[in-house]
C-alpha cells in the first residue's frame, strides 16, 4: 500500500476547520472530508457553509457550525458543538479571519476593527487550540493543529491590525508546539502568499512578482495542509511554518501607504 494512499484514519480522525465557508478554509475542509475525515465546517456565514458542504465529495461527513468567533462565548459554543457531533476532535485548522480593507492603514484603522482582527485570529485560535489540546491530553490521544498565518507575519503589509495578528499567531504556533509536543500534539503553520480566494482580491499584475508566474488559488494550499496535518505523513514535524506562495516571498512588492489621502 502506498504511503500516500491513507493519510488519515477515518475510524479515529475528526477535524474542526474555522473559516470553512470560503477560501483556504473551505478548500482544506473539503479536502479533509474527501479523505474520509469527519469534519466540522465552522464559519460566520450559514449560506457559505451550506454551499461548501454541498460541494464536498462526501457531504455526509460534514457538520456545519455558524457563529462569530470575535464574540466571547462563541469558542465555547463551537467546542461544545464539535464534541456533540463527533465526540472529540483530533485535527484543528484555524483559517477564520475578518475581511481586510486597504483603507485600514496605521492612521485609519479604528479600535473595533483592530480588536476584531486580533479576537478572531489570535484569541480564538489560542482558546480553541488550548481547549482541544486539554481534551486530547485527557484522552491520551495524539493530535495535529494547523494555523493559517501570512507572509506579513514578518513583512509589513500597510495593515497593522492584520500583520500584528498574524505575527502573534506565528509565535503562538511555536509556543503551543513546544508545550504540547510531549503529549503527541503537533502544531504547525501554513503561510499563504497571494491567494485569490476568500476576502483577498489581488491585482492580476501582481503575478509579475511571482516566480511561478500566477496568483495562487485556495486549492493550491489544500495538499500541503493535509500533508502537514497527517500524523502518518508528518509525524516528526512540529513548530514549523510552510510557505505556499509560488515564490512571492522572494520579494517585497508593497510601497508605504499614502497617509495624506
Image (cartoon, rainbow, N blue to C red):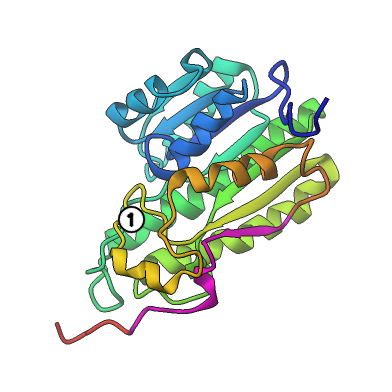
Q: Residues within 10 Å of mark 1 (few under 14, many from 20)?
A: few
Image quarter of the N terminus: top right
- Horizontally, is 187 left or right of 111 in the view? right
Q: Residue at x 40, y 78 (%)?
A: 253
Residue placed furthest toward the front: 213
**Closer-to-camera residue (131/195):** 195
- For disc 1, the marked residue is 200
In the shown orientation, is residue 69 left or right of residue 153? Answer: left
Q: Could you tell me residue 150's position as x and y percent?
A: 50, 62
Residue 130 colored in magenta in the image:
no
Q: Can residue 244 be found in the magenta stretch?
A: yes
What are the residue bounds of the magenta stretch? 239-255
Q: Residue at x 79, y 29 (%)?
A: 141
Q: Is residue 128 in view?
A: no
The residue closer to the viewer here, 34 or 116, is 34
- Asked if residue 222 shows in the view, the reply is yes
Q: Residue shown at 42%/52% (left/top)? A: 119
Residue 232 x %, y %: 79, 35
Where in the figure is residue 10, as x and y percent of width and height?
Answer: 69, 19
Q: Residue 36 appears at what percent x and percent y?
A: 62, 20
Residue found 35% across the figure and 38% down from its top: 68
Of residues 19 and 197, which is closer to you in this image? 197
| Among the 4 quarters of the image, the one containing residue 191 | bottom right
- SS assignment at label 1: loop
Taking the view exactly as shown, the residue that stands out farthest to the left is 261
- Tell me the quadrant of the picture where the C terminus can be found: bottom left
131 to 61, vertically: above or below:
below
Q: Front-most of 153 and 194?
A: 194
Amino acid at each position: 500500500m502506498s504511503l500516500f494512499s491513507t493519510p488519515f484514519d477515518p475510524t479515529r480522525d475528526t477535524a474542526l476547520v474555522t473559516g470553512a465557508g470560503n477560501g483556504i478554509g473551505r478548500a482544506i475542509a473539503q479536502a479533509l472530508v474527501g479523505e474520509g475525515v469527519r469534519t466540522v465546517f465552522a464559519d460566520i456565514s450559514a449560506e457559505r457553509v451550506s454551499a461548501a458542504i454541498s460541494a464536498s465529495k462526501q457531504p455526509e461527513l460534514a457538520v456545519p457550525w455558524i457563529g462569530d468567533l470575535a464574540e466571547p462565548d462563541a469558542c465555547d459554543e463551537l467546542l461544545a458543538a464539535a464534541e456533540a457531533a463527533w465526540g472529540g476532535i483530533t485535527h484543528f485548522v484555524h483559517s477564520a479571519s475578518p475581511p481586510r480593507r486597504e483603507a485600514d492603514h496605521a492612521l485609519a484603522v479604528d479600535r473595533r476593527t483592530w480588536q476584531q482582527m486580533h479576537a478572531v485570529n489570535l484569541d480564538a485560535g489560542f482558546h480553541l487550540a488550548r481547549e482541544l489540546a486539554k481534551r486530547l491530553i485527557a484522552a491520551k490521544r495524539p493530535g495535529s493543529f494547523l494555523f493559517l498565518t501570512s507572509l506579513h507575519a514578518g513583512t509589513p503589509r500597510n495593515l497593522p491590525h492584520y500583520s500584528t495578528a498574524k505575527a502573534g499567531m506565528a509565535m503562538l504556533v511555536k509556543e503551543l508546539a513546544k508545550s504540547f509536543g510531549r503529549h503527541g500534539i503537533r502544531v504547525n503553520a501554513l503561510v499563504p502568499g497571494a491567494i485569490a480566494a476568500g476576502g483577498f482580491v489581488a491585482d492580476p499584475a501582481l503575478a509579475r512578482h511571482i516566480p511561478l508566474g500566477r496568483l495562487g488559488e485556495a486549492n493550491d494550499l489544500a495538499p500541503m495542509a493535509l500533508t502537514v496535518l497527517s500524523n502518518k505523513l508528518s509525524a516528526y514535524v512540529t513548530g514549523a511554518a510552510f510557505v505556499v506562495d509560488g515564490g512571492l516571498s522572494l520579494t517585497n512588492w508593497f510601497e508605504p501607504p499614502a497617509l495624506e489621502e
